[in-house]
Image (cartoon, rainbow, N blue to C red):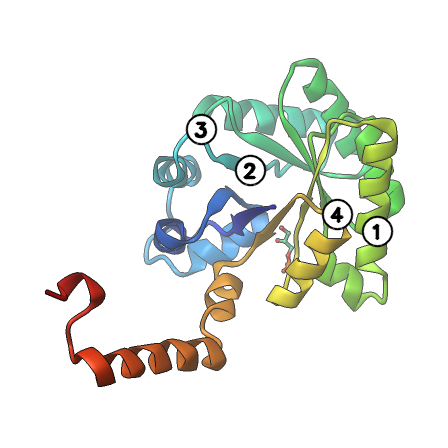
Amino acid sequence: MKYLLDTADLEAIRFCSESFPISGVSTNPSIVRTSFAKLKEKPDFFAHMNAIRTVIGREKAFHIQVTAPDADGMLRDADAILNRVDEQVCIKIPVTMEGLRAMQALKKQGVTVTATAVYGKTQAFLALEAGADYIAPYYNRMESMGLDSDGVIAAIAQMIGEYEYPTEILAASFKNAGQIERAFEAGAQSATMDPSILLAALKQPYILDAVEAFQSDWKSVFGDATAAELD
Ligand code: G3P
C-alpha cells in the first residue's frame, strides 16, 4: 500500500513527509487553485512544482496534471511539465476521448502516464488498454453519485491481474480514512489524499487517551524520567 498526498500545499507536504510514510504527491488544477489561494502572492506554477519536488526528492512519485482540453494541447503541457520540472513526473490525463489519444501518444514516447477523473469501469478499462501506468478512480465522487466505488476498484484490480497489465490503481477523491481503508481492501495499491485526512486519523480521542494513560502510568512508578533516563 502506498500513501500519497493530494495537495500542492508545500508546508503540508513538508510537515507530513517528516512523519508519515509518504510515497509521493499528486496535484490537479483544482488542487493547485485551493493550495495557491492560501498564498499571499500568486506563485510561479513551475517554480512551485519544483519546490515540491525538492521537498519530496526524486525517488518519490510526483503526478502533475495537464490542463489543455485537447490531445495536442495535453501533449504540449506534458512536454512543458517534463522539461520544466523533470522527466520522472507522472503525467496525469483525464480519461476523455482526447485524453486517451494523448495517453497513447505519450506511452509511445515512454512517458509515465496517470489516467485520472475515472468514474467507472469503462473509463478504467480503456485507460488500461491505452497503456496507463496508474489509474485514479474517484472514490468519494463515485460514492456520492450512488456508485459502488469498491466494486469499480475491485473490477479494475481483477482485470489488471487477469490480463497482466503493468498498471497500478491510485485511488483518489477521499473524504475520510474509512474510504481509504476500503479502497485498499478492494484492491488499490496506492491512495492519494488531502493531508488533513491523515492528520485527523491519528488525532482520534481514543488514541490520545491511550497515550496519555501510558504516560501517567509510567510517571506513577518512575516520575518524570523516561526509560532512556533511568539509572
Ligand atoms: O485527486 C482527485 C481529487 O482531487 C478529487 O478529489 O476531493 O475533489 O473529489 P475531490
Q: Residue at x 18, y 78 (%)?
A: 222
Image coordinates of residue 133 in percent, x first then y, are 69, 30
Q: Earlier in the sequence, mark 3 or mark 4?
A: 3
SS of the residue under disc 1:
helix
SS of the residue under disc 2:
strand
Quick check: marks 3 and 4 in contact, CB under 8 Å? no
User: What amino acid type should be assigned to the residue bearing mark 4?
Assistant: Gly
Query: Which residue position holds label 3?
Result: 85
> Closer to the camera: disc 3 or disc 1?
1
Q: How many angstroms separate mark 2 from mark 4 (CA)? A: 23 Å
Q: Earlier in the sequence, mark 1 or mark 4?
A: 1
Q: Relative to residue 177, is residue 132 drawn left or right?
A: right
Q: Residue at x 65, y 59 (%)?
A: 180
Q: How many angstroms separate mark 1 from mark 2 (CA)? A: 24 Å
Quick check: marks 3 and 1 in contact, CB under 8 Å? no
Dot label at residue 187: 4
Query: Which residue position holds label 1?
Result: 152
User: What amino acid type should be assigned to the residue bearing mark 2?
Assistant: Ile
SS of the residue under disc 3:
loop
